[in-house]
Image (cartoon, helix red, strand yellow):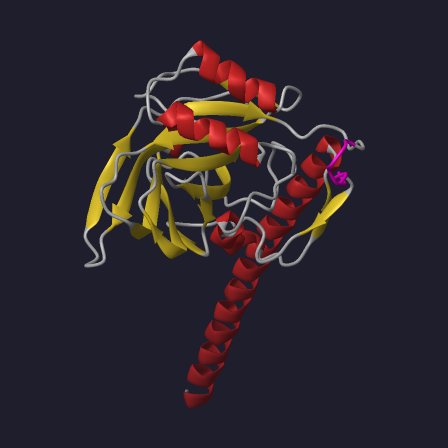
Amino acid sequence: MLIVRSVVMLSLVCVLVGPTSADDANRIIAAEPDHATVSNFGTVTPLIIFSSEPEPELVAGRTPHSRRAWALSGRAWGPEQATGAPNTPQAGDIQSAWASLETDRPVEWLELEYNREVAPIAILVYETHHPGALERITLFRPDGKEIEVWTGNPQALPTDKIHIRVVPLQVDFPARRFRLYLDSSAVPGWNEIDAVGLLDAAGKTEWAAAATASSTYAEKSGRNGMIVSTSATTNSIVTEQTRRLARLEAKLEQLQSTVDDLKAIVLEQARNKDRE
């Protein structure tokens, strides 16, 4: 996925250790002029990169990316979709990102565990659908104590591109477990997250190895290993069909439960009549 290359990450190290400037922003834009623009919010509010996947083309030194299809590993919209490096090809309601069970709940969370302990200078949050709901970030000490390391003000952001939220942190000890809290009621729709990276002082990004969540749409969809076209129109159709099918399956289960209850009542009435 052509979002932000390693040269951009190295530029971000310079940006995050001090106040961001127009020069810093221009340096990041220059690294990927066709794929990213930067909104410069300084050091309090996280830096946000607006990025989108370009059409495939042969570029010197790069392997062309296919926009036709990708293989989904794990449950559609499950928290496991937030592990590993980002792989959602474009902004939108796509199964390769985590989504909560319902929309617009005031509190949802995504917890991530990493293979190594990191004292990050920043967290990179890849928001792929209805971005902007991130409200606070915590980490867990080895003794299990949860420590708040960042708070923000959720607000809806443009939905036409993937948003890479770079949240500067000041953490004086390493950790392996981090939790992102979302206020989904502040940003209507499913607030989907594709990946969460820990950027260390050396410019290396660690991607999550495991993830759990307050809820997941995978509980409804139950889908596994799907291959989906990445065109915007087809994605929309497939996503809506998947959710309709999930709703029909849920209604069918309720209907079956009602039928079973009625059978039990009829049998009980028959037994009572035989006793009479």
The image position of residue 6, as x and y in percent, is 55, 36
Q: In this view, does 117 lie to the left or right of 48?
A: left
Q: In this view, does 202 lie above or below 217?
A: above
Q: In this view, does 205 lie to the left or right of 95?
A: left
Quarter occupied by residue 33? top right
Q: Residue furthest top?
A: 22
Whether residue 238 is visible here, answered yes or no, is yes
Is residue 69 highlighted in magenta?
A: no
Quarter occupied by residue 171? top left
Q: Which residue lies furthest to the right in this view?
A: 58
**Viewer-proximal residue among 134 and 174:** 174
**Viewer-proximal residue among 252 and 160:** 160
Is residue 65 highlighted in magenta?
A: yes
The image position of residue 202, as x and y in percent, is 41, 40
- Magenta region: 59-67
Which quadrant is home to the C terminus?
A: bottom left
**Please, what is the dominant secondary structure of the magenta stretch?**
loop
The image position of residue 215, as x and y in percent, is 41, 50
Q: Is residue 110 above or below residue 122?
A: below
Q: Is residue 212 above or below residue 59?
A: below
The image position of residue 192, as x and y in percent, is 50, 38
The residue depicted at 60 percent of the width and 37 percent of the height is: 93
